[in-house]
Amino acid sequence: MAHPHRPSERSRYSGATRTSRTDYAGAVYGSLLAASVVATAGTLGQYPRLELSILLIVTGLVFWAAHVYARLAGERVRGSRPTPAELRRVARHERSIVEAAVIPAVTVAVSPLLGLGLAATAWLALGIAVIQQVVWASLGAIAAGAGRKQVAAEGAVNLLLGLTIVAAKAALGH
């Protein structure tokens, strides 16, 4: 019988189960974060593509670490410390935040091979981040068993969020 003040290992860190599943919320969040980074980066320095690619990955890593910490701290049982196994499971669960930055970062890095200027590169990376966000939100809704209308609504809400960032980038002239 489980101790009444000690949840089971599975429920203690509910977002991190033993099975490895896609964290759709993290992927949506990471895509929105990547879009925000691209939209606000502007001209960075001597090597803007390299700097933007690094900024995307580093920002994803920092937010991933913050989410791992927040989940572990927020779900901690009084007087307990997370075990290394719990830390690994939560870190794996939250990895989609970083993964969402990879395609926009790679797009920025390879854009010279596509003959794109810096402005076109930023718009392409932003578009990819927004598309990712909509796709991940829709896939998450499908995985949760949502009907077609709910899947469409999830996609539309995330498209609206992404387009808000696009509009901000356009308005700021970045």
Image: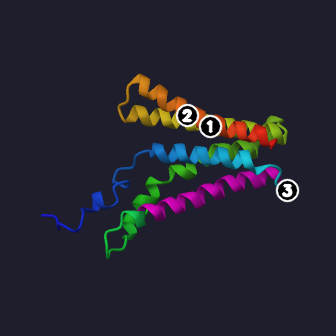
Of badges 1 and 3, nearer the viewer stands 1
Mark 2 highlights which residue? 134
How many discs appear?
Answer: 3
Q: Residues in magenta? A: 45-71
Left or right, 71 with reference to 114: left
The quarter of the displayed image where residue 10 is located:
bottom left
Q: Give the amino acid type for the residue marked by disc 2 in the picture.
A: Val
Of badges 2 and 1, nearer the viewer stands 1
Mark 2 element type: helix
The dominant secondary structure in magenta is: helix
Q: Nearer the viewer, residue 84 or 7?
A: 7
Q: Position of residue 60 (x, y in %)?
A: 60, 55
Left or right, 107 with reference to 92: right
Task: Single out the residue that lies furthest toward the left.
Answer: 1
Q: For the residues marked 3 and 2, what is the alpha-carbon distance in whole angstroms? A: 31 Å
91, above or below 127, in the image: below
Mark 3 highlights which residue? 45
Q: Give the amino acid type for the residue marked by disc 1 in the picture.
A: Gly
Q: Position of residue 143 (x, y in %)?
A: 39, 35
Contact, CB < 8 Å: mark 2 with mark 1?
yes
Is 50 inside the magenta-drawn segment? yes
Mark 1 highlights which residue? 162
